Image (cartoon, rainbow, N blue to C red):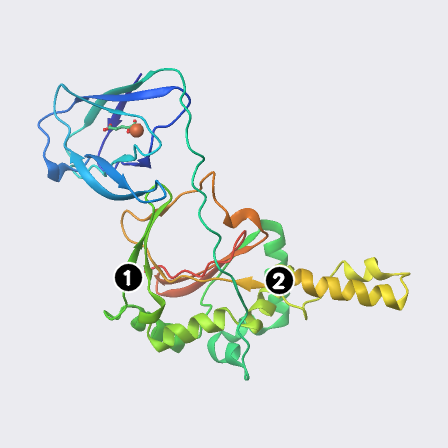
Amino acid sequence: MTCAKYEYTDVLLCHDDELEGRRIAFILYLVPHWDIKDGGNLDLFETDEHGQPSEIVKSLVPSWNTLSFFEVTPVSFHQVSEVLTQDKTRLSVSGWFHGPPIDRPAPFIEPLHVLQPAVTFQNDKLGDWLNPMYIDMLIQSQIQEKFSEDSEIELQNFLKEEKYEAVLSAVKESAIKWVRKGPANKRNYEMASDTSLPGILKECIEVLKSEEMFLLLSNFTGLRLHELAPDSDSEDDMRGDDSESVKAKEETKKKEINPRCRSEVRRWRHGSYTLLHDTDTEGAEYALDCMLFLNCNGKAVLQVISCKWVCCIQL
Ligand SMILES: O=C(O)CCC(=O)C(=O)O
Ligand SMILES: [Fe+2]
């Protein structure tokens, strides 16, 4: 049994309460007069065909000396919405009645994302788009040094000023269709539907997903994300081998690289989040996480983190 205190801006994100033996969840509210506008409601979700939370179907407004309870099941998804009142405290006593554990279905595992190979350009698009300092080899090697120490790096003013301004005003266009991305037990943000993206934004994404960018990221990180990127292991590996086995090794290396990516244009607002989850599949393979932030301090910042490759635009 616990006593919980929620104050202004406190929130409890969507979860199902499931843990071995928990059968009934209960909450006794000890709140002053509470209004739906005060936030802090107990929201109950319905679930989709995969048993994942979809829409909120009921919001219970806490009230003094009221006991709420519900059965803990694989689909008992609920949340406490953000407390919006600045001058009331939401106090509660809550806990679970336990019983013998019952059989549960296996947790839902989201399908793997479709990854695509890098886009090939005829001409030097990267040069058109990027701040020239990032094309400089000396700067690239300094970035690589820092990245190998910290496994992450933030590159300020990444795009050329005029490209950044053009992308920024395009991303604010009302024609973009934003779609909420759930499920709420894993994430809650908005994603632009690809078909509604303005041309300049599409071009920006193509640049970020280009072969040249893969090569540049190889130089920034020291990871081999492109065939032309130097391979620090290969010389040692191949010393003393005859030419046939050198060829065979080169072929295998080529196949091993197989760089691919995916991208999303995301809109983050108050209340948006993503959560790490037991059933996350993206971390299953080696990856880089790469984010181009827009509308933050008036700069285009590229953040590269060793993990997975997602291109997202923060508004
Ligand atoms: O306080 C509430 O209304 C719900 C709390 C809850 O879901 C929890 O503590 O697990
Ligand atoms: Fe709960």
Amino acid carrying mark 1 in the image: Trp
Measured as percent of width and height from the top left, residue 80 is found at 25, 34
Q: Quadrant of the C terminus?
A: bottom left
Q: Residue furthest bottom?
A: 123
* Quadrant position of residue 48: top left
The quarter in which the N terminus is drawn is top left
Q: Is residue 50 left or right of residue 92?
A: right
- Residue 240 placement (x, y as % from top left): 91, 61
Give the amino acid at mark 2.
Gln
Q: Position of residue 291 (x, y in %)?
A: 45, 59
Give me the residue at 39% from left, 65% from top. Answer: 299
Q: Quadrant of residue 34?
A: top left
For the residue pair 5 and 48, the one nearer the viewer reads as 48
Residue position for label 2: 142
Residue 203 against residue 234 in the figure, above or below: below
Residue picked out by circle 1: 178
Residue at screen point 28% across, 53% down: 269
What count of labels does the image hold?
Answer: 2
Vertical order, 248 against 9 (above or below): below
For label 1, the crowd category at 10 Å Cα-Cα, with few meaning under 14, some 14 to 19 and many 20 or more, is some
Q: Secondary structure at mark 2?
A: helix
Does dot 1 land on a helix, a strand or a loop?
strand
**In terms of depth relative to the viewer, which is nearer, 95 or 230?**
95
